[in-house]
Image (cartoon, rainbow, N blue to C red):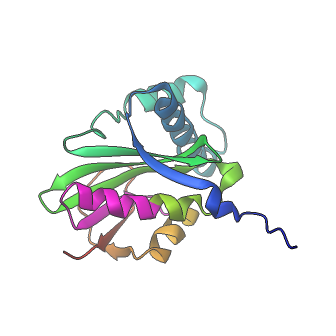
Amino acid sequence: MTITAPRTSDLWSVTTADVTTPEALALLRDYYYDVANRYYRLHLGREGTPEELESGLADSPSDDLAEPDGLFLIGRYDGAAQSCAGLRRHDADTVELTRVFVRPGLRGTGGGSRLLAAVDEATRSLGAHRIVLDTRLDLVEARALYTRHGYREIPAYSSRPYAQIWYGKELGR
């Protein structure tokens, strides 16, 4: 008898969640600290101070990632909240993907792929067929994940301070 261990990707599940729960807020804080500290290290050669990070987090609200024009997704690894993604309506046919995050210790286990599959389903549930996003050039792992899942570079649709590259994905009707 051969016993096969489950693949790590099989340990991931994704559900919609209330963006205001402590669990969601903890993931959003971890997301913000991760991307902000990458920026600080790259451009300033240091970590962000707690005051800088908390101020930036306060200036980046996520309360629009809720129905009726948005959704927040939490990815669970073996039951524990370990990843997230948010969607907000951009226009009648388009949603914007934001706050995509997998905790560093679980990257490479299939959580990002499972999360993006759920994003596609959630986009359709909002009645949209197109997903757009903006990101920074230094977030190379995220950019690779997006292109592996059908996102292609598109013209700029926003002018946010840290937006350096824009992607889109058509889901079809």
Task: State the image coordinates of residue 49 (x, y, percent, origin top left).
Answer: 60, 28
The C terminus sits in image quarter: bottom left
117 relative position to 69: left or right:
right
Q: Residue furthest right?
A: 1
**Does the segment drawn in magenta span residue 134?**
yes
4 relative position to 118: left or right:
right
Residue 109 appears anywhere in the view: no
Q: How many numbered discs?
A: 0
The N terminus sits in image quarter: bottom right
Task: State the image coordinates of residue 8 (x, y, percent, origin top left).
Answer: 69, 61
Task: State the image coordinates of residue 76 (x, y, percent, origin top left).
Answer: 57, 46
Q: Which residue is drawn at the image coordinates 63% and 61% (left, top)?
A: 10
Q: Which residues are magenta?
A: 116-137
Q: Is residue 79 above or below residue 143?
A: above
Q: Which residue is drawn at the image coordinates 64% and 55% (left, top)?
A: 11
Closer to the camera, 129 or 28? Answer: 129
Closer to the camera, 145 or 73? Answer: 73
69 relative position to 56: left or right:
left
Q: Residue furthest top?
A: 51
Q: Which residue is drawn at the image coordinates 44% and 27% (left, top)?
A: 21
Quarter of the figure with residue 6: bottom right
**Does the segment drawn in magenta span residue 130?**
yes
Task: State the image coordinates of residue 47 (x, y, percent, origin top left).
Answer: 65, 37
